[in-house]
Amino acid sequence: MRIQLNLLLASAITTILAVNPRDAPKEPTGVKTITSLNGSTIRYKEPGEEGICETTPGVKSYSGYIDITLDIHVFFWFFESKRDPKHDPVTLWLNGGPGSDSLIGLFEELGPCTVAENMTTVLRDHSWTEVSNLLFLSQPVGTGMWFTVVSGFSYSTKEVGSLDPTYLTVESTTNKTEEGRWSVINVTALDTSRLAAESAWELLQGFYSALPNLDADVESTDFNLWTESFGGHWGPSFSTYFYEQNEKLPEDGSKGRKLKFKSLGIINGIIDEPTQTKYLLEFTKKNTYGVQLINDTVYDHGAFSLNMPDGCQDQLDYCNWMKRENSIVRRSACAAAQYICQTTVEGLYYRFGDRGTYDIRKPTGQDVPPSYWRDYLNTAPVQNALGVDLNYTSSNLIYTAFSLSGDFAAPYLPDLEKLLELDIQISLVYGDADYICNWLGGEAISKVAKWSGQEAFNNAGYTDLVVDGTAYGETRQYGKLSFTRVWEAGHEVPYFQPAAALQIFNRTINGFDIATGEVEVSPDSDYATNGTAETTHTTTLPPLASSTSG
């Protein structure tokens, strides 16, 4: 997910470990190794054979590391499709943050299993493995169990120390009852979405090159990228870079596996700050739940800060105007724009609102799914089964690095517009109860995107998204582009509406209309939904329960 950073409060830059204190993990046993054609090494185990996550008979899964250089080692987890792994596509899933691990998506949203409070896994209904092979990557550098080797450290000498049991921070003491191991990382090595895309392409090619030896049952080169939250940056930037590199590959496979790009899906994504930021303020009054999230005085202050000369919007537009990707001037300008907008517009809700950031139907602090899986990944049997010897961690250092690089405020709408002229299905999916990447901003992106079908898309109407006779939302679609507002869903749509999310995904990757799944839609199709010009569904929320002291 996109991380809420409350910039109204002073904060130190610390590495936060999302774990309970544990002994430092031991080296895993039974790890197998493959060297791929591009020189990458795949070190893996089959966790399903040890009862971890995907335990469906006959369905395989693999986890471990893709070593793209001697210094960069990326954790992956691959699951076969339950339907037809040979012919079904491979879908890469990426969560956002930046620094939010894709294992969030695996365990909380769409993977084959979830983790219960008693630290056991339960097979998930409506897993996306019902229709696709799924690949989860922990990226960018430093996310989850990815590790790099810098400043003289080696794989065999990863940092070992203790974890503060209250604040879950790395300590310099050596209390052996609280010992842990974590990766040594250089978070500034890949601190923009475009740099991360280059690394991700190497990872993808390393994986595909080794796939015939890893899992010979998977033969299809059909490829989908689906992502969430800050994935609004990952999706367009990665897809455009992947497509450009893919076009350079010869058909004979001598320099890499040539892929067939089928779809890009973005769930509650922040694609373009210059377009979407103003809708953070608008959502506080014009959400479809009938609640005013901040009072009029705070709203007016935000509106002034947004629109004043040299205010938030002007700063974002200036960042957008400066096209030099590696210019220190642009990096500084875009970093300043993000800071100004978060403190004077976005952050007002965090300071003065009392509802959730990721689900306004819930109180602050109760707006995200349970995350028992984080502790689960820090148990010795699971670590050994996955082929890892690191504590599971997340870090706000990655978020900070991307903030300081200016990547948050950098626009990725131009990349999305390039993709709209290619033979790729694009689905924008937004849960309507999310504040931080809300559907009003997502809808705005779908309307302002400049492409050959822009006018026809905007003339299409909203119609109900129907799954098994039940309406779950409203969809506008013209040809390859669809925008869907999913009712009664927060930031992580597949968690809140799993049946709807699975069918949106299934219909997109197989080339059917999103609303009904009954009409075949090719990328050059003139299919259009017919309905109302605006979404019309509303829900009335009761007041939050009053908190009492004593």
Image (spheres, helix red, strand yellow):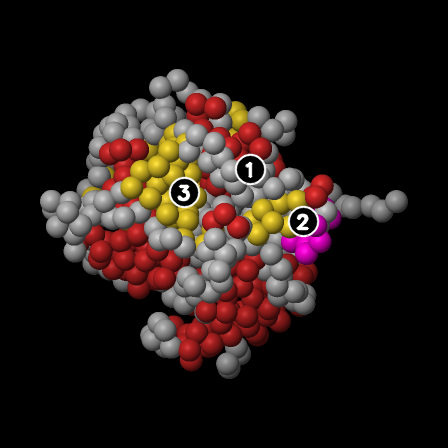
> Regarding mark 1 in the picture, which secondary structure is present there?
loop
Q: Residue under label 3, please give it.
A: 65
The three-letter code of the residue at mark 1 reads Lys
Measured from the top left, where is residue 403 in percent x and y? Answer: 50, 66
Asked if 318 appears above or below 478 in the picture, the reply is below
> Regarding mark 2 in the picture, which secondary structure is present there?
strand
The three-letter code of the residue at mark 2 reads Ser
- Residue 339 part of the magenta segment: no
The residue at the point 50 percent across, 47 percent down is: 156
> Regarding mark 3 in the picture, which secondary structure is present there?
strand
Quadrant assignment, res 116:
top right
Residue 26 has which mark?
Answer: 1
Marks 2/1: CA–CA distance: 15 Å
Marks 1/3: CA–CA distance: 16 Å
Of the image marks 1 and 3, the number of the one nearer the N terminus:
1
Measured from the top left, where is residue 37 in percent x and y? Answer: 23, 44
Count residues near mark 2 (Cα–Cα under 10 Å), then give few for <14, some for 14-19, many for 20+.
many
Asked if 332 appears above or below 52 in the picture, the reply is below
Foreground: disc 2 or disc 1: 1
Asked if the residue at tag 3 contacts the one at tag 1, i.e. Cβ–Cβ closer than 8 Å, the answer is no
Count residues near mark 1 (Cα–Cα under 10 Å), then give few for <14, some for 14-19, many for 20+.
few
Of the image marks 2 and 3, the number of the one nearer the N terminus:
3
Give the quarter of the figure containing the C terminus. top right
The residue at the point 63 percent across, 27 percent down is: 118
Asked if 327 appears above or below 51 in the picture, the reply is below
Viewer-side residue, 127 vs 171: 171
Q: Residue under label 2, please give it.
A: 162
The three-letter code of the residue at mark 3 reads Tyr
Residue stretch rendered in magenta on the structure? 165-174
Q: How many marks?
A: 3
Marks 2/3: CA–CA distance: 25 Å
Quadrant assignment, res 397:
bottom right
